[in-house]
Image: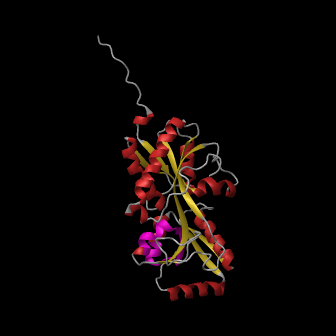
Amino acid sequence: MALSLAAEPAHAQDKPLHIVLGFPAGASSDTVSRLIADKMRVSLGRPVVVDNKPGAGGIVANMAVKSAPADGSIFLMTPLAAMVAYPHSYTKLDYDPFKDYVPVAHVAAFAHCPRHQRRSAGQDRGRIRGAGQDRRITLISPLRAPAVLPHFFGILFARNAGLELTHVPYKGTAPVLQALYAGEIPAAFLPIADLGTLTQSGKGRLLATAGTIRSPQYPDTPTFKESGYNIEGSAWYAMFAPAGTPKSIVDPVARAAIDAVHALMSSSAWSRWALKLPASGRPSSRRF
């Protein structure tokens, strides 16, 4: 006869830390999450895994994290839209950004811009004149869910230009970029970080950015305001935890995430995506 003791359950800090992302691979949000996860893995001394749970413009991921245990094993990486825009644009939303999550770290800010598959400025002007004649424009956005920020910026552009908008949603950023590359679609609104690679390779041209100033990475691209359109705005990526996650767990993860961003800001991998760290390291728990 032998006496045995049941093994103690592993503490959450010994388990992999999962960063849940509501968007597929190929988007800037996926790249940002993986770059940060690689750095956090070292500083936290534990595995950090990015779990892509695309669907409904990020809502599927938000719901998954809302119902997850508040033990430090699961966090959410999300852009502004799911936390700020959706509560105002959906009549029914099964999560509350203020009650169901704890803000952890504000990791990056970015601007949106339209990209044209042609390179010639003359061709761009001709395309715009053509759109102005029949007063119609087709907007391509990367997600099937309405109310994503590219959709909103497209609406603003159409209203400013006095054009009739047709919204054509795609199943993610990667299919939009492939369609642009192949010339299947004329233009699309996307975060500037998503457009960098194809633009730098000469496969397309940025027409304007929605930032308050020109992008340092693309100084020859004017802002919308410089182009005569009253359009201005930016967005962010931030990390959240399920409501009830203790401060003793949130704070080390927040420090690791911000340290990761600071370490990445000087790297070519980060600058290639035209992202910057916001002025505040962490978002307010009262206002996102």
The answer to whether 267 appears left or right of 20 in the picture is: left
Q: Is residue 163 visible?
A: no
Q: For the point 45% across and 65% down, which residue is it? A: 174
The spot of residue 250 in percent (x, y) is 51, 40
The spot of residue 11 in percent (x, y) is 43, 31
The answer to whether 283 appears left or right of 32 in the picture is: right
> Nearest the camera: 145 or 83?
83
Placement of 44 over or under 265, stated as above or below: above
Q: For the point 42% across and 78% down, which residue is it? A: 203
> Nearest the camera: 221 or 207?
221
The spot of residue 163 in percent (x, y) is 67, 79
Q: Residue furthest left?
A: 1
**Residue 266: quarter of image:** bottom left
Magenta stretch encompasses residue 85: no
Q: For the point 65% across and 47% down, which residue is it? A: 286
Q: Is residue 222 visible?
A: yes
**Residue 101: quarter of image:** top right
Q: Residue furthest top?
A: 1
Q: How many marks are shown on the rendered structure?
A: 0
The spot of residue 248 in percent (x, y) is 51, 35
Identify the coloring: secondary structure
Q: For the point 59% across and 60% down, which residue is it? A: 145
Q: Which stretch did the figure color magenta?
A: 178-199
Magenta stretch encompasses residue 184: yes
Specify the quadrant that holds the N terminus: top left
> Nearest the camera: 53 or 235?
235
